[in-house]
Amino acid sequence: MTATTKATEILQLIQQDRLSPASARLKLWLKKEPDNADAWHLMGVVHLHREAFADAREALARAHRLQPGNPYILNNQAVALLRLGRPNESVDAARKALALADADPGFWANLGYAQQASRDFAAMAEAFEQASRRAPGDTEFTLGWATALRQQGDYAAARTTLDKAEHPDLGIRLEHLVLAVLTGDSKAEQQADRALGGHDLDAADALADAGCTGAALTRYRRHLERHPDDATARYLAQALEGRIAETNNIDYVEHLYDEAAPRFEERLLGHLDYRGPRWLAEHLNHLGEPDLIWDLGCGTGLAGPVLKAEWPNATLVGVDLSDAMLALAQKKRCYAALHHASLNDGHFLDRLAPEHQQPDLVLLMDVLIYLPNATDWLRSLVDKLPGGCRVVITLEQGRHEQIQPQARIQHDGDAIREALLPNPCVLDEAGMIRLEKGRAVEGRWLILEKGGC
């Protein structure tokens, strides 16, 4: 069998999502030919499909060293780097790929997504325009171009761009609605509503993300008239009205993340520009040399590839209340164990195996936003940790225990630090943590160390 035939058959397996046989064949191939660039490239693609982005980056780096002039390797490196929270490096890799092959619209789109994560919307618009010119009518590229124009405030150009879509999908129709509301065009708003054909919940979410609170609330209420038992929609509508109870709605959070799982990372790292993985990658030197890491509220495992890239022999244990999120985290192959549990359950740590009970590092990344009475919860958790264990906490900085219209809870980093004395603070930084309605959400990044033994 020729190398070309072998690569074609393996690629077909990957396209069929038969990743295990594809991986097995690649391992045999690399055992015989450890310096085969095509095999390493395909292994990187397998890791990308498994969302094991640290492994993908390593395999693709080896492929690139063996075949530096291959633009497809560079393009896949750009994807892996973006998913690892390294948008600037992703932009660099995407540009290098385009320098070798600028006719591929997918290469331009990947550059656009990296620039979106970097919040360079002018460059993002240019990249998606180039992609659209090479694939006229493609809805993904058209939507990316229009979104970038909207983010720059050029609503007329965004609307003109949307009109280029030959077969407007749901994303295109939602963007038409958002633009109509932002421009106060009631006729266009009515047309967009008709085109959406009852997708009121999607419309409400899109409008809330764009900061159109009143229009979003109208769609939530309309949806609830037809679906009065939808607890998630009711919870979000009440949040926009400022009528949210100061208790954690576990059923809501679990359902929310189960539903959000398929597009969670794309949305969080792209549209919402969540800085967690990027910040973590830049501050590894403050985390010691951990052997055992708890990732509490691990979600899809965004932190896993970052940590395993630095400490491949460390043991990662994840806990989350969403089965759909845990299934995606499992695909990354970073975690020794994953547990379905609510952090509000006082016995959730009892589910951990005996060998997983004494961590060196605990991550609480974007977790406290759904935990009322966080100081009491944190004291209880820290009391259980061994001396010297470091705890990473990210907050939406604001008034302590203040619930926001978006159904997340703000906390004051000073109050958290005071509540956890005498455990010393290794690092305390302020900065943007994510976007909300296109505006930066101020965050606080704390690394504490458990004092004493």
Image (spheres, rainbow, N blue to C red):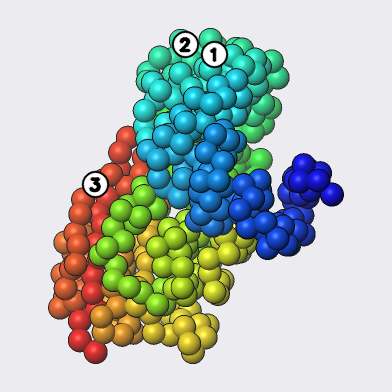
Looking at the picture, which amino acid does disc 3 mark?
Answer: Gly
Residue at 53% over, 51% down = 62
Residue position marked by numbered label 1 in the rendering: 161
Question: Is any part of residue 439 visible from this angle?
Answer: yes
Residue position marked by numbered label 2 in the rendering: 157
Residue position marked by numbered label 3 in the rendering: 431
As measured in the structure, the alpha-carbon distance from the residue carrying label 1 to the one carrying label 2 is 6 Å
- Residue 304 at x, y percent in the picture: 47, 62
User: In what element is the residue under mark 1?
Assistant: helix
Looking at the picture, which amino acid does disc 1 mark?
Answer: Thr
- Is residue 24 found left or right of 345 in the rendered image? right
User: In what element is the residue under mark 2?
Assistant: helix
User: In what element is the residue under mark 3?
Assistant: strand
As measured in the structure, the alpha-carbon distance from the residue carrying label 3 to the one carrying label 1 is 34 Å
In the rendered view, tell whether residue 416 sits above or below residue 440. below
Residue at 47% over, 31% down = 96
Residue at 41% over, 34% down = 92
Do tag 1 and tag 2 residues touch (Cβ < 8 Å)?
A: yes
- Residue 260 at x, y percent in the picture: 57, 49
Q: Quadrant of residue 294?
A: bottom left
Looking at the picture, which amino acid does disc 2 mark?
Answer: Ala
